[in-house]
Image: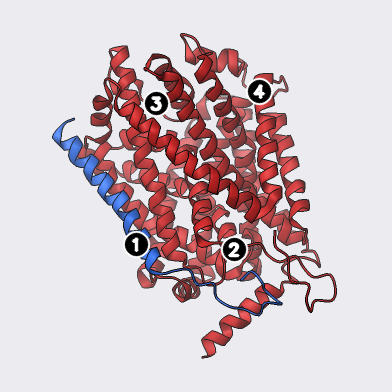
Amino acid sequence: MTPIAITFLVISILTVWGGLGLALVNLSRHPEDEGHLPEEIAPEL
Amino acid sequence: MTTASSGGTPLAAPVGRETFSSRKLFILSAIGSAVGLGNIWRFPYIAYENGGGAFLIPYLAALLSAGIPLLFLDYAIGHKFRGSAPLAYRRMHRGAEVLGWWQVLVCFIIAIYYAVIIAWAAMYTWFSVTQAWGDDPGAFFTGEFLEVSETVNVGFNFVPGVFWPLLLTWVAVIGIMVAGVRKGISRANGFFLPLLVVMFVLLVAQSLFLPGAIDGLNAFFTPNWAALGDPSVWAAAYGHIFFSLSVAFGIMITYSSYLKRKTDLTGSGMVVAFSNSAFEILAGIGVFAALGFMAFTAGSTVGDVAVPGIGLAFIAFPTIVSEAPLGGLMGVLFFGSLVFAGITSLISILEVIVAAVQDKLGWPRVKASLAVSIPVAFISLLLFPTATGLYLLDTFDAFVNSFGILAGALVAVILVAWFLRKLPMLSDHLNRVSSVRMRSVWIALVAVVAPVVLGYILINEFISKIGTTYEDYPTWFVGVFGWGMAAALVVVAVVLTLIPWSSKSKLHHDPEYAALIAAEEKEEGR
């Protein structure tokens, strides 16, 4: 591959897959909060 | 399927709104919806045609400035108003309901033709083993396989080789829809999406070792800086992002309405958006490595063999499969990926219609699923597995994308941002439950950037389609199934809005939503 193509391959993967990695890290730092509502009205919420 | 608790509810307890059992399953389902056929056969060509490696700049700009903000807008509307597109918009403002029905009808049009492509891909998965296309995949596709008529018309000359796989596709999809959000949609995505990723990674790995693959990657990633000065390149990036992320046609509103009360909307949305883009980059690498091999064996250049869409999947790829070592395996991986990507997207498209009917008529899940899916499947089976089906599919696709999705998105952002002025309220809702805060920058992106870009793209689309008859098809054909279909969506949306909501509907009787509102008011009062 040409150096410029390799550079853009690396940049593409780093930005997009890196963005995904950061998004996953952010999500793991904010665990799911089930919330709470009266069970008899909204059992799934 | 979940139902409201019977304890303490004496009479005709309304059916409780279904929910995704976990945030992970919602994210998987949303990624399954976003990752569709376009990621595999559209993005690589769009990127190559619009600057190669340099396209990454407008692509990321479009993702961050329009794609993700509009994704969050859909999430906020669906989660705040907890309904299908018509119900959510109706709860936002009485006059906005018509926008929801417009989105539902766009999904109806897409569903009836999208299933046919899945059926083609399923057949080509098998053809990859037998290499049924012989020496001329192009002639095989339009001739022996689709038996395409020479005259552009609407006929009922059925092609059994497409009809039966299409019927099986619909049976499978209807089964998923009837099973509901948890047992159907969540499980299907939990199974198909990981399988899709594994298969596609194997396909990419195989493609990279083919002779000529390097030339394909050079063509794909070498930047053409001059392209960045061309407004059409930026429009292509924004246009692709809108289609790719499944925004503004009701899917994400519907899916987010099935989320629990305190789900992290923006944090989840970031994962969905970047996963979609990550898959697209992977698809670009795999597809262009394979095209590099095709050019190598043909003694031509990548530019000569690169084509988008149906031409790439059903003509170029079979050629590659015929010539590559272990080509049969490569074909199974590629077409199998199309099938799985297509099914996870199709069920999300159908869910928009099922949820809307369920909400408006107060019907239970199974009844609504069957009442929607069977007629949609019937129309799909009537119109598309025929000798003229390809012309209809092509016209529907071109016009519903431009004057259904794009026009609907433009109307939605203008209505919500400028007429109803709901963005501050939706911003507050996002920030109440989310980890990544959306404030004035998000509001500016949705209220200013998105309408400007959408308006520009839509005007260009209008000029290009009004200037010449689409694909040189007969004027009456384009008038009826292109312009006529697009106009009919708006008219029928108005008619559906005028139909009164059932007394059993979620609009009139939804204790869960009332409880949510009460809980939010209580929190705000603290």
Q: Are marks 3 and 4 on the same chain?
A: yes
| SS category of the residue bearing label 2 | helix
Residue B268: name its quadrant.
bottom left
Disc 4 residue type (three-letter): Asn
**Mark 3 against mark 4, which lies toward the viewer?**
3
Residue B198: name its quadrant.
top left
Using the image, tell me which numbered label, if any, was put on residue A25: 1
**Mark 1 against mark 2, which lies toward the viewer?**
1
Q: Return the chain for callout 2.
A: B
Chain letter corresponding to the colour red: B
Colour in which the image shows chain A: blue
For the residues bearing labels 1 and 2, Cβ distance under 8 angstroms: no
Disc 3 residue type (three-letter): Val
Q: Return the chain for callout 1.
A: A
Find disc 4 in the rendering and name its residue: B153
For the residues marked 3 and 4, what is the alpha-carbon distance in whole angstroms?
Answer: 26 Å
Q: Position of residue B298 (x, y in %)?
A: 32, 12
Residues packed near mark 4 inside 10 Å, few (<14), some (14 to 19) or many (20 plus):
some
As drawn, B453 above or below A41: above
For the residues bearing labels 3 and 1, Cβ distance under 8 angstroms: no
Q: Return the chain for callout 4.
A: B
Find disc 2 in the rendering and name its residue: B257
Q: Position of residue B483 (x, y in %)?
A: 60, 39
Q: Residue at x 72, y 67 (%)?
A: B506
**Mark 3 against mark 1, which lies toward the viewer?**
1
The earlier-in-sequence mark between 3 and 2 is 2
Q: Are marks 3 and 1 on the same chain?
A: no
Is residue B205 visible in the rendered image? The answer is yes
